[in-house]
Image: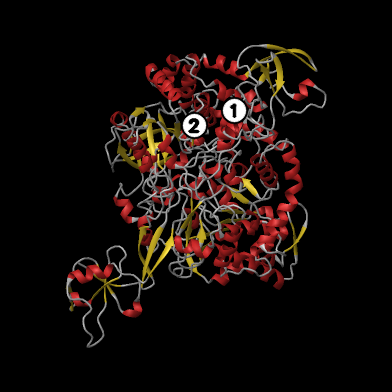
């Protein structure tokens, strides 16, 4: 029993009791009749009734009933990047101005009587957010650093003071160094509504670039981009009910996708055979029919062995691959390049290709505007003489080259690499080929391997050879993303017009290019990607890993040749060539002066973050963080501003086709302390910059293109000439929903009451368009049916699923076709392979210090180690260990895990560095070198754009050793 004054409502003289129905303490006798429940982590609040008033309660039952009353209920969700499980509608219960609990809404309607509905959606993180929003880690007031960075010494300041000091510094830098010296980071929790709009429009108005962090975190799917020309494509989770084979290969959805897990289990009840392919015996393996324990980093070899069996036994779907892929296209044997139109006639096109037609016995140019073969029968094998402009050459189909390559990947050879028995490989190959519908449930695991591009190419090759793409219950989950469409233009619209009129004007401006591209046979999907790539080249967004390479992590990120024996030159040589040829966009060369962190956490997220302290961070004039919790980046900032929590503002999320619903957050309670919404923060910052520019008589700045812009009008431009101010979040949301084209016309007022709305269409958003399918109100979602059913070309150079990449970088590395390469020993020649996974007990770092969730685990960072590996090192469960390699070291608690294979150690992510001794986490030992293939460009589909086609991390290949730390 304990007694303390409530910090929630001092004005009412309430007292909080932890446990018990009545107590005597400090001479104060309290009875049941004086108890009043306001909820929140099991806390009972005491309130003495007015003198002479009748008691409100007579029994303990009355107290229990009282806790289930509330003043209001709001609809909301949580704006963290839970991604694959993203999108859950919650009822938020408010009493006495306090959010005291949340509850899953459970109101999703069943759209198909043959499949289950989406109820319930939610996880334990969302179910305790009302506790997290009131805990000790919440930032409530603006603060300015008074000690050294990272010391945790702060002075409370007003919003006005902080914004004015920052605005003055921004003005100074804009005039002296230019806007390229100021960079924004939105992190992964950016929104689809007003709060995301605030940052994007700020970057546009000031011409200050924003980090494009998708490749930074490793969610960029380079193999998918190289093979199908896009990363965004996914079916819905209920589409699994049309599968008879589900492969969980590259993920652990039972562990990490709590709201989606029931679909997998129910699909299994429905008759689907579930196979997990993973090194460790994880939660998904436990609930599968078959577990295939592949060696870490050998998934490409397994994929190619499966393809070997499929082709050897004639199980491939020849009609499908002839129509949908580049496997029939002809390749010159003398150069190894595709036979192109430019080889055959003067002025011929570089993007026209050929196949040998068995029906006519002649070579034919491949259809360009459609995948339909129109009676042609492309040959998949053989050699054919062709007269070109340079003379007679011999050509052969890609399938012939693939078939020769697969000779090296027999089940026997692959078994030695993967650790999987030969008969297991053969049975798996036959099962995939003969399945009615096979689905591959994967996540962003392979993106984070150095050779992950090849692993993804091989996965897609397996399904494609069997025709398991673009039909109900089949396909692979790429980067699953969906957002409101028709609203993107608000970020760059002319302030002289309303956003709606501005969107129309921008569409009219793009119309000539759109029409010209249409006439050239390009699909809407291809045109949208082309337009976005063109905009990306303007430099409004920066590829994060290229940025870190330039400003402080060059030795780490550029170290690929040190570990990769197949590289004949250093990464910098590849990178400079990519810059010179315009294949990649060079980050601003300006010295970095100001970094604005508005949703991310670079000093946790970035591999090698600890080296940034002495390079990038040390050289900054100003590091500003806007957040609701004290992250590691906030701890090292010069200014920290308090962000409103997820129940304290209004917005709409981006979502995924896995759960195809747009969810909103609505303001259930006012922001705590002096916190403000993201929209208000960016709005007030622009307003202050304009105000100070006028007061200082500084009218203009020169942008990165050399054009003069008005600095004393930036807020006018940002706010659409005063149409919106810092309190206009709902007005912005109202206008955005009026512009939205894929939610069935629902208004902000309507969706605010309901909490969510099902997507009705993809719209023309580049985030959505790659799903390439029609969304029907009474059917599950199957990705890529535009290609398989409507015969629309894929957005690749060949306009087909493309397995042969004759790009010079790919040819230099010997990776024209999918291949297995041994995982490099990043960090040095050490015996333990450090893998990582997404934690179950947090979404990134947001809940990593939550007291209830810490009780469900060890309460501090741990590393999992196999029983035998621990025994050899005399390590016992719960002991402190040192993890080290050539790069660095860190200390952590060991957890003995029989579910791990020998030689593998696992570290679940998201712990803040300050939760480790000396502030040094697992990211300190990861060199994270860039694979040179990920800076390739110039191909139609190998060009940088937001979220894809820029280089990513390689932390899954890190090698370490572990030693027990002797007790003093």
Give the image location of residue 5, x and y in percent: 29, 74
Answer above or below: position of 811 versus 530. Answer: above
Q: State the quadrant of the C terminus.
A: top left
**Crowding near the residue tagged with mark 1, few <14, some 14–19, many ≥20 C-alpha atoms within 10 Å:** many
Residue at numbered disc 1: 324
Of mark 2 and mark 1, the one earlier in the sequence is: 1
Q: Is residue 701 above or below residue 908?
A: below
Q: Which residue is mark 2?
A: 826
86 left or right, relative to 13: right
Q: Is residue 286 left or right of residue 390?
A: left
Q: Are marks 2 and 1 in contact (CB under 8 Å)?
A: no
Is disc 1 placed on a helix, strand or loop? helix
User: Which image quarter is the N terminus in?
Assistant: bottom left
For the question of whether residue 334 can be seen, the reply is no
- Position of residue 882 relative to residue 504, above or below, is above
37 displayed left or right of 827: left
């Amino acid at each position: 029993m304990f007694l303390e004054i409530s910090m929630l409502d001092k004005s009412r003289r309430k007292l909080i009791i932890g446990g018990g129905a009545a107590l005597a303490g400090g001479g104060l006798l309290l009875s049941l009749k004086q108890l009043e429940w306001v909820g929140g982590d099991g806390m009972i609040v005491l309130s003495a009734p007015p003198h002479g008033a009748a008691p409100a309660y007579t029994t303990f039952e009355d107290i229990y009933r009282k806790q289930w009353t509330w003043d209001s209920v709001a609809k909301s969700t949580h704006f963290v990047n839970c991604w694959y499980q993203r999108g859950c509608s919650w009822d938020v219960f408010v009493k006495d101005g306090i959010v005291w609990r949340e509850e899953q809404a459970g109101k999703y309607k069943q759209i198909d009587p043959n499949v289950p509905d989406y109820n319930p959606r939610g996880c334990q993180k969302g179910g305790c957010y009302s506790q997290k929003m009131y805990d000790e880690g919440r930032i409530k007031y603006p603060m300015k650093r008074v000690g050294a960075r990272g010391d945790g010494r702060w002075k409370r300041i007003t919003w006005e003071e902080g914004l004015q000091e920052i605005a003055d510094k921004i003005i100074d830098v804009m005039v002296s160094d230019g806007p390229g010296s100021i960079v924004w980071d939105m992190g992964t929790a950016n929104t689809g509504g007003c709060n995301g709009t605030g940052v994007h429009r700020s970057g546009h108005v000031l011409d200050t670039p924003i980090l494009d962090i998708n490749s930074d975190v490793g969610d960029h799917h380079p193999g998918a981009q190289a093979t199908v020309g896009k990363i965004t494509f996914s079916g819905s989770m209920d589409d699994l009910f049309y599968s008879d084979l589900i492969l969980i290969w590259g993920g652990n959805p039972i562990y990490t996708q709590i709201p989606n897990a029931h679909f997998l289990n129910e699909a299994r009840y429905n008759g689907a055979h579930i196979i997990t392919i993973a090194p460790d015996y994880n939660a998904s393996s436990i609930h599968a029919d078959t577990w295939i324990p592949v060696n870490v980093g050998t998934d490409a070899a397994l994929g190619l062995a499966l393809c070997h069996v499929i082709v050897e036994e004639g199980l491939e779907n020849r009609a499908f691959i002839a129509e949908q892929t580049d496997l029939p296209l002809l390749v010159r044997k003398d150069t190894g390049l595709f036979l192109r139109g430019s080889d055959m006639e003067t002025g011929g096109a570089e993007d026209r290709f050929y196949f040998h037609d068995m029906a006519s016995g002649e070579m034919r140019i491949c259809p360009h505007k459609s995948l339909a073969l129109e009676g042609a029968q492309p040959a998949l094998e053989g050699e054919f003489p062709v007269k070109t402009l340079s003379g007679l050459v011999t050509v052969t189909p890609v399938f012939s080259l693939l078939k020769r390559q697969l000779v090296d990947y027999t089940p026997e050879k692959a078994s030695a690499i993967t650790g999987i028995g030969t008969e297991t490989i053969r049975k798996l190959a036959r099962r995939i080929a003969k399945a009615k519908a096979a689905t591959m449930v994967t996540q962003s695991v392979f993106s984070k391997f150095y050779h992950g591009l090849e692993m993804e190419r091989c996965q897609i090759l397996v399904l494609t050879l069997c025709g398991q793409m673009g039909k109900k219950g089949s396909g692979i989950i790429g980067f699953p993303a969906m957002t409101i469409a028709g609203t993107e233009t608000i970020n760059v619209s002319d302030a002289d017009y309303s956003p709606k009129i501005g969107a129309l004007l921008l569409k009219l401006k793009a119309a000539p290019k759109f029409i010209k591209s249409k006439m050239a046979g390009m699909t809407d999907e291809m045109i949208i990607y082309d337009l976005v790539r063109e905009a990306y080249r303007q430099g409004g967004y920066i590829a994060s890993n290229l940025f870190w390479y330039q400003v402080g992590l060059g030795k780490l990120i550029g170290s690929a040749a040190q570990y990769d024996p197949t590289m004949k030159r250093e990464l910098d040589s590849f990178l400079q060539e990519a810059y010179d040829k315009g294949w990649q966009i060079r980050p601003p060369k300006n010295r970095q002066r100001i970094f604005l962190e508005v949703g991310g956490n670079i000093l946790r997220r970035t591999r090698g973050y600890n080296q940034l302290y002495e390079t990038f961070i040390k050289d900054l004039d100003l590091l500003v963080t806007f957040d609701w919790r004290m992250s590691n980046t906030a701890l090292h900032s010069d200014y920290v501003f308090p962000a409103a929590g997820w129940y304290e503002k209004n917005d709409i999320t981006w979502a995924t086709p896995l759960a195809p619903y747009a969810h909103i957050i609505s303001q259930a309670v006012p922001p705590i302390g002096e916190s403000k919404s993201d929209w208000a923060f960016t709005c007030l910052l622009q307003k202050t910059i304009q105000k100070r520019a006028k007061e200082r008589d500084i009218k203009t700045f020169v942008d990165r293109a050399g054009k003069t812009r008005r600095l004393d009008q930036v807020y006018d431009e940002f706010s659409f000439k005063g149409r919106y101010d810092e309190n206009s979040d709902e007005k912005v949301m109202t206008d955005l929903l009026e512009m939205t084209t894929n939610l069935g016309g629902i208004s902000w007022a309507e969706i605010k009451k309901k909490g969510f709305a099902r997507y009705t269409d993809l719209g023309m958003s580049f985030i959505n368009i790659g799903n390439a399918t029609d969304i029907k109100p009474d059917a599950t979602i199957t990705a890529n049916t535009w290609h398989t059913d409507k015969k629309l070309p894929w957005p690749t150079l060949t306009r087909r699923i493309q397995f042969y990449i004759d790009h010079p970088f790919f040819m230099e590395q010997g990776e024209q076709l999918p291949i297995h390469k041994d995982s490099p020993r990043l960090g040095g020649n050490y015996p333990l392979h450090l893998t990582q996974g997404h934690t179950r007990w947090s979404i990134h770092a947001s809940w990593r210090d939550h007291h209830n969730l810490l009780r469900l685990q060890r309460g501090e960072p741990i590393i999992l180690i196999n029983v035998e590996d621990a025994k050899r090192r005399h390590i016992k469960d719960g002991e402190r260990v040192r993890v080290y390699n050539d790069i660095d070291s860190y200390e952590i608690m060991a957890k003995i895990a029989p579910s791990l294979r020998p030689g593998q150690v696992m570290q679940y992510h998201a712990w803040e560095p300050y939760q480790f001794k000396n502030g040094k986490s697992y990211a300190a030992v990861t060199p994270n070198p860039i694979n040179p293939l990920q800076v390739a460009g110039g191909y139609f589909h190998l060009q940088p754009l937001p979220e894809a086609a820029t280089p990513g991390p390689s932390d899954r290949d890190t090698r370490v050793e572990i030693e027990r730390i002797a007790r003093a």
